[in-house]
Amino acid sequence: MKLLHSPLVLAGKLRAAFSSPSLLPVLSAGIVSGLSLLLVQVAFGTFIFSGALSAYSSQGIGLILFGNFAVCLLFSLLGGYRGVVAGLSPAVVLVMATVVASVDADGEALLVTAVCTLIFSAAATGVFCLLVGNFQLANLLRFIPYPVVVGFVAGIGGAACLAALSLMGVNLGLQPTHLLEPIVLWTWLPGLIYGVVLYGAIKYWKNSLILPVSALFLVSAYFLALFVFGISYDEAREAGLLLTSTAQGNLWPAIWPTDLVHIDWSAIVGQIPHMIMLILIALIAIVMNIAGLEVAVGKDLDWNREFRVTGIASIFAGLGGGTVATIIVPISLRHKLLRASTRVTGIIVACVIGSALLFGDGMLQFVPTLFVGGVLVFAGLGMLDQGLIESYKRLPRTEFAIVLLIFVAITFFGLLEGVISGMVATLLFFTVRLSRLNPIESVFTTREHRSKKARTVPDRAILLAESARVKVYKLQGYIFFGSVNILSRHLKDSLDSSARLFCLMIDCTNITGFDFSAVNVVARLVKQANAMGVHVVFSGLSENLRVGLERNLPSSVFGELYLEPNIDLGMERCEELILAAWKTDKATTGQRRASLFENTVEHLERYLDRQIHFENLIEGLQPWLIPRRYATMETISAPGVPYEGLHLLISGLVSIYNSDGLRLRQCRPGDAIWPTHPLTETATIIVADEPCRTMLLKPETQRWLEQHEQELTIKLYQYLLADKYRN
């Protein structure tokens, strides 16, 4: 699929959208969304460029606004969902603030180095997203463990609330009681109240006008309070109650190409761990927001396309300000609810944000600091609600404990510590959980299951009598150092049991993978079985597992293993070993033969009666049957081969296989050979195991018999029906 629309096609669609009668709701939705996004991004920019970078806060806000303008415009034109809005995710904001705050530089080098660090991070994220999209790898990123994602969200939400208090002048290093001092109380309490009320109002009413209207009301009330208390504008600005201008009228660009000579490359190299963390959190935010938009709008998105768009937008916006592009789900969903899901809506949002760059930073001087703190509290509460409260309702308590661990680590120790603790806890949790999964799918003997090979009545009686001496373990899933102990315990119990085990079979057909510990444990058990004189048979063994056993077993022990391609041939091998051992055991041959004769008399009588019935049936049908002879390994019937008719086997052995090459049945004299499986009616492959003779009954002959030899036909069908369900 092409990422970019044809310019003429895109221009035609935009022209039609601007001339549409539904333009009014599109304009109103775009303007309101643009104002809301503008206010939030100003707060985010102020927070990112605070502390040592507060002297460049206006330039920082300009960088963020330019990045938002760019990503909104590009997503509107190129995104797969019309009406989408993109910008900074709160999760990414906190990491960006951590990155720029840890830049070790002074003077003019501080701003240039911090901005270039964000640019490199955004460009690297964009390149990675482009590679994911171009090589169709987006589906691989869907499977981030849910507790880890939720824990990151909750932790960043808690850290955002604490950062809001710090931004509003609260010294978090002092005793908590200092928060209640009157002077300190008035610096943070109004902002906290505003953030809580704003979040509650938007969650309850879900109205897009709440944020811009509340911001206008807050600014008006704030300046009214300054007037009532006799605080001048200059005094409020010097006290840190209002944002101040640091850019002399221009919000963007913050740096020029000539400023690049001030880059402190050693400081940028020192930021590589933080940059990697920023890229990781950005990818998590991108995945979460794409998935969230799919759920919210009820539409499947092309993830590879969205990653390509994200990559282009992040690179372009990063060159202007270091903004990593992510979809903003609430605003995008609101456009759908307002029936404003058009590309024009996103363009209007971008224009509203871009217009703020034209007005300079004069507007920032009217923004109270508590508004910025309140918006951060609002964003933090949203993530806490989603990360803690909602996950508590849905997650099992063990997985919710991981969420709490990550939340505490990020909130009180730092993002890097939270990431590390979360990954370690998740790995430990899944290791413990996987170790409890039973790698043994089933255990059985030749009494419960036999191979598909046709056996004589005496052989079947021998296998039934000696069934306890054969034990088959059918394995499943991924076997590693945690789960192999379960297998080891069962195999040891079988080897150490009072029953005299003669043959141990391990079926590996359904094994998806293994590690060295599993190979090592199985190799030790094979050596123990070999020392006890127990034959070991493997079926469905992969090449990697075969090589692993060969490397971990002495050549003499490995040479005595029986390796069969599938479980049926493995069972046949076990049966052959049991039969050979029984027939060569001279110590109790006489006693066993007498017991065998007693147990098989009735079965032999039924077998002879069946053969007599079969021979009589062949004799009656002789005039209408066509004799056929087949050599060893000659195909009798297969998909794509013209259907000849029903074969009645006179001599020799014939095997029936499915399309995967697994033997379904072995036929012996007296059996009817069907071209399809008797129960599933799927086409089969029928091959002669040795020279054999059959009698062919063609379909047209069978239809003639139904009309003219009804009594003989009934006898034939009675025999075929009994033969069909006997097998």
Image: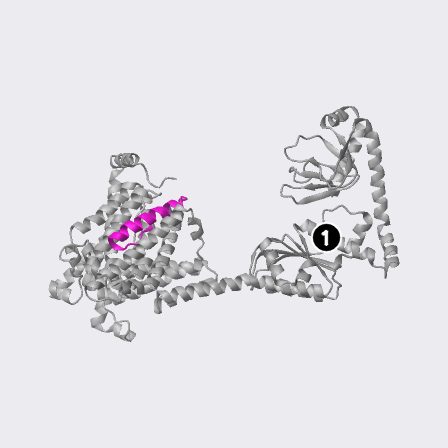
The picture quadrant where one finds residue 301 is top left
Q: Quadrant of the C terminus?
A: top right
Give the main secondary structure of the magenta stretch: helix
Q: Residue at x 83, y 30 (%)?
A: 620
Asked whether the viewer can see residue 305, the reply is yes
713 horizontally vs 221: left or right: right
Viewer-nearest residue: 321 or 159: 321
Give residue 283's position: percent from left, percent from top. Answer: 37, 55
Q: Is residue 179 above or below residue 124?
A: below
Q: How is the image coloured?
A: one colour
Compared to 716, does 30 lie above or below? below
Q: Position of residue 326 (x, y in %)?
A: 33, 52
Residue 330, x across and y down, in percent: 33, 50
Residue 207 relative to residue 526: left or right: left
* Residue 447 visible, this orientation: no
- Going by the numbered disc 1, the residue's amino acid type is Arg
* Residue at which label 1 appears: 573
The residue at 29%/76% (across/down) is: 175
Residue in the image at 42% along x and 52% along y: 141
Question: Which quarter of the rendering shows the N terminus?
Answer: top left
> Picture quarter containing residue 5?
top left
Residues in magenta? 299-328
